[in-house]
Image (spheres, grey):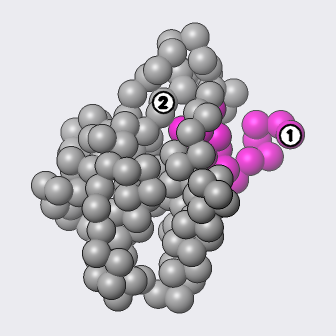
Amino acid sequence: MRPDMYTAPERLLFEVTRGVGNEQMLAASRLLSQHDDAFWLRQFLEPEDFATKRRYERATEIPDVTLRSPFHMGPIQHLRWDQIGDLLREGLPTSSSETAILAVAASLVGEYSINLREVLNALDDHQVQLVITAIADVSLVSS
């Protein structure tokens, strides 16, 4: 598939998962790409303003400068789940559902603990289905 044939969420998912073999990280990243037009991936990889960039810049890293993106020809960035867990513990200026989705993703990787009842109360039916799919993806690998 040509680079211009990808949707923005697919492109961002490709960026953060290229070279990642950890199934939990893959499932967590897929969850972020499927939620709200990849809201969190856009925040981490393509911040719209300087304040957002400064707030979330520690959530990504460039693991290998030779890995190049077919979309922007710059280096591939990966998510730093430990730093995402720290951001969640510090508190985020986002809606409860946006925070809940990020918390579930970080918990799948093992970098953040969640209260499932609180998380589910913050989500609508569609978002709950996304979480169920992500959990099932990780459970299938663990069995």
Seen at 74% across and 47% down, the residue is: 6
Quarter containing the N terminus? top right
Inter-mark Cα distance, 2 to 1: 21 Å
Q: Between residues 63 and 1, which one lies in front from this camera angle?
A: 63
Marker count (numbered): 2
Q: Which residue is mark 2?
A: 77
Q: Which residue is mark 1?
A: 1
Identify the secondary structure beneath mark 2: loop
In the displayed structure, 117 sits above or below 141; it is: below
Q: Which residues are magenta?
A: 1-18
Quarter containing the C terminus? bottom right
Q: Position of residue 34 (x, y in %)?
A: 58, 63
In the displayed structure, 78 sits above or below 26; it is: above
In the displayed structure, 18 sits above or below 68; it is: below
Q: Is residue 34 visible?
A: no
Identify the secondary structure beneath mark 1: loop
Q: Residues within 10 Å of mark 1 (few under 14, many from 20)?
A: few
Q: Position of residue 135 (x, y in %)?
A: 55, 66
Mark 2: amino acid? Gln
Mark 1: amino acid? Met
Q: Is 12 on the left or on the right of 100, as rendered?
A: right
Seen at 32% across and 49% down, the residue is: 111
Helix, strand or loop: magenta stretch: helix
Residue 4 counted in the magenta span: yes
Which is in the foreground here, disc 2 or disc 1?
Answer: 2
Q: Is residue 85 visible?
A: yes
Say the numbered circle drawn on residue 64: none
Q: Is 62 on the left or on the right of 70, as rendered?
A: left
Quadrant of residue 129 within the rendered picture: bottom right
Q: Between residues 110 and 69, which one lies in front from this camera angle?
A: 110
